[in-house]
Amino acid sequence: MRQAVRFLPTLVLCAACLPALAAPAPRYSITTILAGQFDYVEATGINNRGDVVGGAYVTGQEWRGYLFADGRTTQLGSLGGQYTRVQAINEARQIVGESRTPGGISHAVMFSGATVTNLTPWALRDSAASAINNAGTAVGAIPCDCLEFHAARFTRGGGVSDLGTLGGKSSNADGINNAGQIVGWAALAGPYTPRAFLYEKGKMRDLGTLGGEWSSASAINEAGHVAGSSALGGQGGDHAFLYVNGVMSDLGALSGMDSAARGMNNAGQVVGLSYQGWDINEAVLWEGGALFNLNSLIDPASGWHLTDAGAINDLGQIAASGCHQGLGVCGMLRLDPASMLRLDPASMLRLDPASMAPVPEPSTWAMLLAGLALVGMRGRRRKVRHSRAGGCLKREAFNDYHRLQHRHSRAGGNPSSLLCHGMGFPPARE
């Protein structure tokens, strides 16, 4: 009996450690694609092969675009200049984005193998491509003048179509699915007010907002579900949204702060980021009606702090970016689920997000972190530094939802849709 009493404190201590020892393994492992002393790094696209595209920026230099495929990271070329920024990749490994000539003129481009193709006439300045479907149709923006631009569709053979606006002066396309449905944002008539739109059958439709003045759509899946970001009413800030069957739903944010949706797959999983303070971001995942900080779903011992998630494929792999707290570098990453989804596209279209296997309960992760704290493992968060890339066409600034809300008042000038049409780009025809 005395022996049992002697060992009672030890037994109690071991019992306290059991929740941590019993905690499940991290949901995602990390593949490092690119890491270095970058001021800004982004992972923007991923296909179902697990190929990832993105880029990095260092102050005083230019954007560099990268492709991760077959286990190797390759720097992409350019149109002769020093600037390449890529946004998306399809199953055929066609990559779209924008690149500059030696004279500093940006053009929408497509990379296919070692070939770089300009998607617009050489005389056109500052166009850009944001997304591509498996048919090779890309979308993005073409300029009307130095201050305004219109959403555009780029087709094989050099065809460029102006998608117009919602009555205002500017618009931009950010997503396209294999059915040819296009999403993005477009300004309303009058004072500059961007709204999320869905373009199909030759018409652009306003998707509304979450109660505030502006909204912007960033992704669309094969079911026609749309993800994006919107201002809330009053002083509520900005939140990610999911638009399904004519209803825009608020996806929420961590700690009540702002959030933005970047990408979505056919299973209805949405990824993006949530702002925890000025220049402090957390990469997040929305699924099954719940919001999860992706940093709680990786091994804390990895040293990585995930700051943004740009895209997710149908296997559940995520293109993300973050900074390593121990090495002092930032990088492009791929998050690989411990058990990847293996569903054919037809079954994914029928999948109800609410029926997906839930991630571990937050309380379980809290116990895991508590256990790690006992052995002195505690992470330090690092701020994310943002660059302000120059150029006449500030399209990239509009696509950063954190800055979009601060740019409602635009510079002067009175361009109209006729200026775009006058450049030789006809209105889109289905």
Image (spheres, helix red, strand yellow):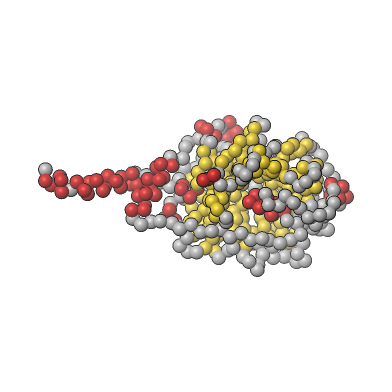
As drawn, is 417 to the left or to the right of 394?
Answer: right
Q: Is residue 179 above or below residue 275?
A: above
The residue depicted at 65 percent of the width and 49 percent of the height is 401
As drawn, is 148 to the left or to the right of 59?
Answer: right
Image spot of residue 329 (x, y percent): 52, 63
Q: Nearer the viewer, residue 209 or 120?
A: 209
Quadrant that contains the N terminus: top left
The residue depicted at 61 percent of the width and 43 percent of the height is 236
The residue depicted at 64 percent of the width and 42 percent of the height is 234
Image spot of residue 113 (x, y percent): 66, 55
Quadrant that contains the C terminus: top right
Can you name the residue that lies furthest to the left here? 2
Q: Nearer the viewer, residue 403 or 77?
A: 403
Image spot of residue 422 (x, y percent): 88, 50
Q: Quadrant of residue 360?
A: top left
* Residue 154 showing in the rendered view: no
Can you name the residue that lies furthest to the bottom here? 60
As drawn, is 392 to the left or to the right of 66?
Answer: right
Image spot of residue 389 (x, y percent): 68, 61
Q: Nearer the viewer, residue 99 or 303?
A: 303
Q: How many marks?
A: 0
The residue depicted at 51 percent of the width and 32 percent of the height is 355
Can you name the residue that lies furthest to the front here? 234
